[in-house]
Image (cartoon, helix red, strand yellow):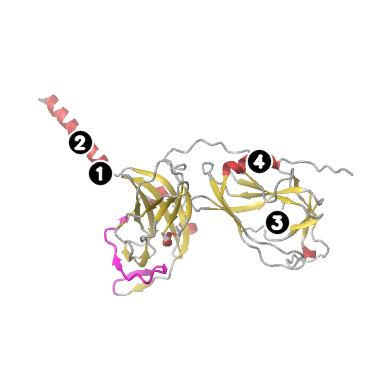
């Protein structure tokens, strides 16, 4: 009898464990992002309710009149573990003036779920917008569109309001059909408040321990240029409108002849090194680099430019050499994750200036292949100048 009771208790325990396991949805993370930092509208205080209310930014969908208050919205208690880079850094990442529009894409119960997280800047937020029939995921390889099935809670095609404790993070879900296992690159459309309106995303290679083991590169050896003259010809403070005040550098890193703007990348734990090739068309030619230049990862995270080795930022300068030289500049950015496959390069336009052939135009290069840019590394080996007369 005693053994029967012990066996019965064991079976009941197993049944209980199985039931709890079945209640918890199986979740596999495909991609995630801390998101865009958005300025928060000024809160209004209601003396009667003694609560603060924020009216969120318009989404240009004023023609949709449906409005509802969301009930039973889920509060994400594990947000700090999902985004540890945001936890404990609220003075930097979030305060009453800024809200991070973070998101995570998962596989759950044979569906694809986009979790749109919203940190409550007040006790009540109105005029929020999540999704309508425009929301979809597009497989970049096949072009197949995976259209929205529903939202949870039900806010489909509606403006809505939320009541929750200020500072809490609510979880708003957009549900799509399951993606094939072969899908690695998608584009997300139709989630404007989270700035997902044509965003390319790499999936299934960053999470759940499934990332392939990739080694970091060694820091590249680079021949740094040296300052030759503090001013070209006038000993005055730098003035972009007066090229006589620009600095003059020499001894650039020389490379074999390659196409102008060819790039190579090195990933290290401390920094990302991005080499940029240029032709020296004149014995003195001007160049410039903006400190606002960034690399953008597949999830939208930006990696800032720290320096261009041996050269100034945010001002034009001359490089002295031989017409016919092929030279390289080495940009140093914050470190990219070693397991991503693409990034985008964005260099903003510089301020206008007066000079012959004046041009400090911006550059946007989307979805650059890291493998391809790593294979370009030998192109940037230093080569001494050889001159035959």
Q: What quarter of the picture does the N terminus occupy?
A: top left
Packing grade of label 4 (10 A; few <14, some 14-19, many >=20) is: some
CB-based contact (under 8 Å), mark 3 and mark 2: no
Q: Is 356 situated above or below 209?
A: below
Q: Secondary structure at mark 3?
A: loop
Residue 142 in percent (x, y) is at: 45, 47
Residue 336 in percent (x, y) is at: 55, 46
Distance between mark 3 and mark 1 Cα atoms: 58 Å
Q: Is 265 situated above or below 66?
A: above
Earlier residue among tags 4 and 3: 3
Q: Secondary structure at mark 2?
A: helix
- Residue at 32 percent of width and 54 percent of height: 149
Q: Which mark is residue 23?
A: 1
Front of the two marks 3 and 1: 1
Distance between mark 4 and mark 1 Cα atoms: 51 Å
Q: Which sits in the foreground, 127 or 180?
A: 180
Residue denoted by label 4: 377
Q: Please give the range of residues in magenta.
A: 48-74
Q: Which mark is residue 312?
A: 3
Packing grade of label 1 (10 A; few <14, some 14-19, many >=20) is: few
Q: Is 354 situated above or below 345?
A: below
Packing grade of label 2 (10 A; few <14, some 14-19, many >=20) is: few
Front of the two marks 4 and 3: 4
CB-based contact (under 8 Å), mark 4 and mark 3: no
Q: Which sits in the foreground, 272 or 132?
A: 132
Distance between mark 2 and mark 1 Cα atoms: 12 Å
């Amino acid at each position: 009898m005693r053994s029967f009771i012990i066996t019965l208790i064991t079976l009941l325990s197993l049944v209980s464990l199985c039931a709890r396991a079945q209640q918890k949805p199986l979740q596999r993370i495909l991609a995630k992002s801390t998101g865009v930092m958005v300025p928060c509208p000024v809160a209004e205080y209601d003396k009667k309710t003694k609560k603060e209310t924020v009216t969120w930014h318009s989404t240009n969908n004023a023609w949709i009149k449906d409005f509802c208050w969301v009930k039973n919205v889920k509060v994400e208690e594990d947000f700090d573990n999902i985004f540890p880079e945001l936890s404990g850094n609220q003075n930097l990442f979030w305060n009453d003036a800024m809200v991070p529009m973070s998101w995570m894409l998962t596989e759950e119960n044979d569906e694809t779920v986009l979790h749109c997280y919203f940190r409550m800047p007040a006790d009540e937020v109105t005029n929020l917008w999540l999704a309508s029939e425009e929301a979809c995921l597009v497989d970049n390889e096949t072009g197949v569109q995976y259209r929205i099935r529903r939202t949870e809670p039900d806010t489909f095609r509606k403006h809505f309001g939320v009541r929750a404790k200020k500072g809490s993070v609510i979880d708003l879900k957009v549900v799509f059909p399951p993606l094939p296992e072969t899908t690695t690159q998608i584009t997300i459309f139709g989630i404007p408040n989270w700035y997902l309106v044509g965003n390319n995303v790499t999936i299934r290679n960053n999470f759940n321990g499934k990332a392939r083991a990739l080694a970091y590169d060694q820091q590249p050896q680079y021949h740094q240029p040296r300052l030759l003259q503090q001013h070209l010809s006038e000993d005055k403070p730098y003035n972009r409108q007066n090229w006589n005040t620009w600095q003059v550098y020499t001894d650039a890193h020389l490379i074999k002849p390659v196409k102008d703007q060819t790039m190579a990348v090195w990933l290290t734990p401390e920094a990302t090194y991005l080499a940029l090739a240029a032709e020296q068309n004149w014995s003195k030619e001007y160049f410039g680099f903006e400190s606002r230049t960034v690399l953008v990862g597949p999830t939208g995270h930006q990696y800032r430019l720290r320096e261009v080795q041996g050269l100034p930022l945010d001002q034009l300068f001359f490089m002295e050499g031989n017409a016919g030289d092929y030279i390289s500049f080495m940009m140093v950015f914050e470190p990219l994750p070693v397991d991503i496959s693409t990034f985008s390069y964005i260099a903003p336009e510089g301020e206008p200036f007066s000079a012959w052939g004046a041009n400090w135009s911006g550059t946007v290069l989307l979805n650059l292949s890291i493998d391809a840019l790593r294979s370009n590394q030998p192109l940037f080996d230093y080569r001494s100048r050889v001159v035959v007369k």
